[in-house]
Image (tube, rainbow, N blue to C red):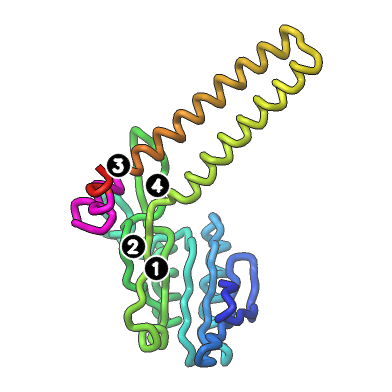
Amino acid sequence: MWHPSVKMSIIFKSLQMITCLAVLLDDQSELVVSFVYALNEESVRRHLWAELLSVATDPRVSGKPWSVLGDFNQTLDHSDSSISPNPNTDLPTRLFWDCLLHAELADLTYRGCSFTWWNKRSTNPIAKKLDRILVNEDWYLKFPSSFGMFDQPRTTTLTWRKKRVKEAHAKVLLLQQQILTEPNPSLAALERSANENWQTLLHAEESFFSQRSRVTWLKEGDLNTAYFHRMTSAR
C-alpha cells in the first residue's frame, strides 16, 4: 500500500478497523480503503457494524470509491458455510446484513476459494467464508474490472517452513561449534538429535518444492505455454 504512486493517510482508526484515504498521484483521484479484523465476541462486532455505518456517511468517504476488506468473523449468507443451511437466519447474521445494506456495501466479484476458514478437524471439518472484500457503487464505477482473489494461504506456510529449516540449521551449527570447543557426550547427543531434526525439515522442504514444481509443470505445460516450450527444448 506504500507504493510511490499512492499517497496514504489514516482518517479513522479503532480496535477492529483502520480506514485510509488513498490518493492516486497519477490522476490525483481519491479512494477510501478500510481494513477490518473483527473480534470473536459477537457483542463487540456490533460496534464494528455501527462504525461502518458511521464511516459510510462521513463527508470524507461519501461520494468516493470505498472498499472494506478483511476478516469479518461473521458469515453473511447460508452459502457462506459448508454445513447444512439453517432455514432460520440468526440475529448476528441479520445485523451484519442490515449493516451492509444501509452502508450500501456489497461483495466485490471474486475468484478462488469459496471459503476462507476451516476448523482443522479431521472428523467434522467445517469451512466458512469469513473474509471478504466489500465495495460501494462508486468503487464499481471507478474500477469496473476489479475483482478479489481468495487463494490458499500458501505464502505464510512457505515462509514458516523456510524459517523452521533455517532455525534448525543454526542450532546444528551452534552445537557443532560448542563440540569443537569443548567436546563431551552430552553435546554430541544434542548435536546428533538437532542434525536429525534439521535433515527431516530439509527433506520436507525439498519434497514440498519438488511437488510444487510438478504442479506448475502440469498446470502451465498442458496450456502449451512458454514454460512448457522451455522445458521441452532443454531435453
Q: How far, Cα to Cα, is label 1 from label 3?
A: 45 Å
The quarter of the picture where the N terminus appears is: bottom right
Residue extending furthest toward the front? 234
Q: Looking at the image, is mark 4 or mark 3 nearer the viewer? A: 3
For label 2, count other residues whose C-alpha is less than 10 Å away and answer few (under 14), some (14-19) or many (20+): few
Circle 1 packing at 10 Å, graded few (<14), some (14-19), many (20+), is few
Q: Which residue is mark 3?
A: 214
- The answer to whether residue 221 is magenta is yes
Foreground label between 4 and 2: 4
Badge 4 marks a residue whose secondary structure is strand
Q: Which residue is mark 4?
A: 118
**In the image, what residue occupies the spot 33% across and 62% down?**
89
Could you tell me how many numbered marks the image carries?
4
Q: CA distance from mark 4 to mark 1?
A: 22 Å
User: Magenta part of the protein: which range?
Assistant: 215-230
Does residue 54 appear left or right of residue 129 in this picture?
A: right
In the rendered structure, which amino acid carries the disc numbered 4?
A: Trp
Q: Which residue is mark 1?
A: 94
Picture residue at 54% right of the left edge, 69% below the top: 35
